Amino acid sequence: MKNLSLSLCFLILFALSCKQGKVSPNNSDDTANTPPPPTATTPTERKLVWSDEFDYTGLPDAKKWNYDVGGHGWGNQERQYYTKEREKNARVENGRLIIEAHREDFSGSQYTSARLVTKGKGDWTYGRIEVKAKLPKGTGTWPAIWMLASTEPLRWPDDGEIDIMEHVGFDPNVIHGTVHTKAYNHGIGTQKGAQIRIPDAQEAFHVYAIEWTKDYIDWYVDDKKYFSFNNVSGTKETYPFTYNFHLLLNIAIGGSWGGQRGIDNTIFPQRFEIDYVRVYQ
């Protein structure tokens, strides 16, 4: 009888505990400890949409690169002639793109170089654009990683320009990031930009990048942000960066900025070496 009473009491207590929501650990579904499902605001992973890893040899991949050609100064009184499909000035070797400037007489110019463009083969609106590169050195060099609108015809500065990286040889430790628009451009002295000191930019590879959205563009070197340009007014005059742009890579020689302290003719040839170009969206 004593055993029966104890059993009955146990059953009553168990029933009460179940009614109050207490269950055995062995039967628990641990709902309280399960992480909530991702929400609509959870960041999504970027996708690589375009790249050149330069894992080949010879001329730059014609499926990805075009050339700007000529020696008319390019609006900046530059001294070089940009050539097309000339390996002396642009080639891929040892896993890197080499843009090489030479001192030589060519089509009325005293220097040759190359300016590679992705227009029609790589055009994007928004994303992360990054280029791992080592810069040339010497007074008179003016390498750049930059973007222009893919509109036809191009109206500068109304359609905008994004300078991901600019460097002038007479100021070797400074990297510049800049935008040009109708309201903000060097022609009227209102351009917007910033600088970061990279003492070994001419000896070592660094990753130059932008994060570009409809609301802002951020500039980075090796993932260190040093400049941000925001779409404050929402007008094309101040922020025309809401449609397709393409990438340009080049070394200019001399010019209104690169040649401010002359050109050292003892430095040639000079190389701009690019390890990779990657575009994420």
Image (cartoon, grey):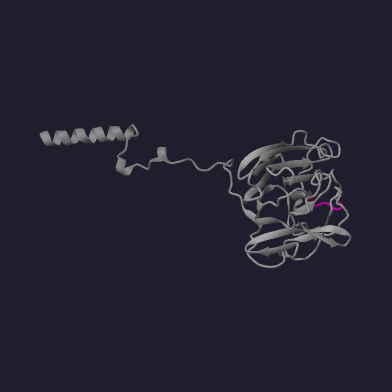
Classify 265 as above or below 85. Answer: above
Residue at image coords 74%, 47%: 169
**In which quadrant of the rendered view does residue 235 lie?**
top right
Q: Which one is in front, 33 or 237? A: 237
Magenta segment includes 61: no
Residue at image coords 20%, 32%: 9
Q: Is residue 207 left or right of residue 186?
A: left
Magenta segment includes 150: yes
Q: Position of residue 146 (x, y in %)?
A: 74, 49
Q: Residue furthest left?
A: 1
Classify 42 as above or below 57. Answer: above
Q: Residue furthest front?
A: 266
Q: Position of residue 256 (x, y in %)?
A: 84, 45
Q: Main secondary structure of the magenta part?
A: loop
Q: Which one is in front, 206 or 39? A: 206
**In which quadrant of the rendered view does residue 32 lie?**
top left
**Count of residue discs:** 0
Residue span colored magenta: 149-153
Classify 116 as above or below 24. Answer: below
Q: Which one is in front, 71 or 20? A: 71
Q: Is residue 21 left or right of residue 47?
A: left
